[in-house]
Image (spheres, helix red, strand yellow):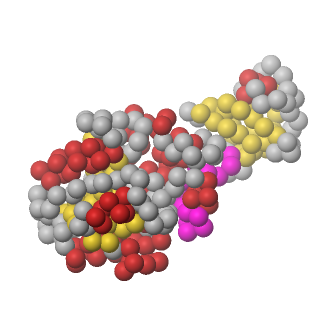
């Protein structure tokens, strides 16, 4: 549950349209994984003790629906449309103006939306450090060149300069670099995800529930199958799932046998593709 009054923070989380998000993340269901990471990030931020509210900036309809439900008791999540539609920094400036007008006594913190290993306590440590130094402060990503968190205490302009080499840009603009002082205590906060290796590193720290589910292979055992009419299978979690005939023929094998192990790829709750685990 977030705090109120002086010392409270409003966290701003930009979420790119999912169709254009994480293009270097070569994993199945890339858009689903991108959304799952955003939900875990927002949920962790909302659960941090020092966070009063979370403001998400996005134009993606799926993200709008999912992230509005990612709040915690006493810490609401507000989803804003990306009114400027002129890039990340413009979106953050827009959100900062809205948040500052609504919460004039709170600090503002721009947080990367791809932090599936983030823990609320890590964000609290970083926000407390930012409050202690005052003004503007930031935390660099694990690679050391980017920025995962940019903070500005109440009454101070946020001045976002995200993009290539944003660590240098934020340091050059006068913001305090909190990275070394926080060290390994904020490993999940610093682990943003752009590539498969980033995702593996985040998984080693422990993914949030949504990202863990989105990146776990959906496997099942065929229960019955008939050409032309399809069949069904029992997922590893015990649930029963329908196997449409077109999902099987699209994947290559035309015949399935009861007891065969298969991998499922779904879209909107319907299985679109079935592949044999032995292939």
Q: Residue at x 88, y 35 (%)?
A: 257
Q: Looking at the image, is 273 positioned above or below residue 180?
A: above
* Place of residue 160 in the rendered image (x, y in percent of width and height, measured from the top left): 27, 54
In depth, the one of 255 and 45 nearer the eye is 45
Q: Residue at x 17, y 48 (%)?
A: 97
Q: Is residue 92 left or right of residue 67?
A: left
Quadrant that contains the C terminus? top right
Quadrant for residue 196, please give it: bottom right
* Place of residue 192 in the rendered image (x, y in percent of width and height, measured from the top left): 48, 59
In depth, the one of 200 and 237 nearer the eye is 200
Q: Looking at the image, is 98 positioned above or below residue 170?
A: above
* Place of residue 83 in the rendered image (x, y in percent of width and height, measured from the top left): 25, 35
* Place of residue 116 in the rendered image (x, y in percent of width and height, measured from the top left): 49, 58
Tell whether position 211 is magenta: yes
In depth, the one of 261 and 123 nearer the eye is 123
Q: Is residue 44 left or right of residue 79?
A: right
Answer whether residue 71 is visible to the viewer in this image: no
How many marks on residues? 0
Q: Is residue 219 left or right of residue 167?
A: right
Q: Looking at the image, is 233 positioned above or below residue 178?
A: above
Predominant secondary structure, magenta span = helix
Tell whether position 119 is magenta: no
Quadrant that contains the N terminus? bottom left
Q: Is residue 226 left or right of residue 270?
A: right
Residue lying furthest top in this view?
Answer: 228
Q: Residue at x 57, y 46 (%)?
A: 24
Q: Residue at x 41, y 42 (%)?
A: 16
Answer whether residue 30 is visible to the viewer in this image: yes
Residue stretch rendered in magenta on the structure: 201-218
């Amino acid at each position: 549950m977030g705090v109120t009054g002086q010392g409270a923070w409003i966290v701003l989380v930009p979420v790119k349209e999912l169709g254009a998000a994480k293009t270097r993340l070569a994993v199945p269901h890339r858009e689903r994984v991108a959304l799952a990471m955003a939900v875990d990030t927002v949920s962790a931020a909302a659960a941090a003790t020092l966070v009063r509210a979370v403001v998400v900036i996005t134009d993606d309809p799926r993200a709008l629906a999912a992230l509005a439900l990612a709040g915690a008791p006493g810490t609401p999540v507000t989803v804003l449309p990306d009114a400027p539609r002129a890039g990340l920094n413009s979106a953050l400036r827009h959100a900062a103006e809205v948040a500052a007008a609504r919460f004039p006594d709170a600090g503002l913190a721009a947080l990367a939306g791809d932090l599936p290993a983030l823990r609320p306590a890590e964000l609290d440590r970083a926000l407390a450090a930012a409050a202690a130094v005052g003004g503007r402060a930031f935390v660099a990503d694990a690679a050391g060149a980017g920025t995962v968190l940019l903070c500005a205490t109440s009454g101070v302009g946020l001045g976002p300069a995200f993009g290539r080499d944003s660590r240098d840009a934020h340091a050059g603009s006068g913001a305090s670099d909190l990275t070394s002082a926080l060290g390994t205590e904020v490993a999940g906060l610093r682990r943003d995800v752009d590539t498969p290796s980033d995702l593996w590193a985040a998984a080693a720290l422990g993914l949030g529930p949504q990202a863990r589910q989105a990146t776990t292979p959906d496997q099942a055992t065929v229960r019955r199958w008939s050409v032309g009419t399809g069949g069904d299978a029992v997922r590893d979690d015990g649930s029963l799932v329908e196997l449409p005939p077109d999902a099987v023929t699209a994947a290559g094998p035309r015949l399935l046998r009861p007891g065969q192990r298969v991998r499922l790829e779904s879209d909107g709750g319907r299985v679109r593709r079935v592949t044999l685990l032995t292939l």
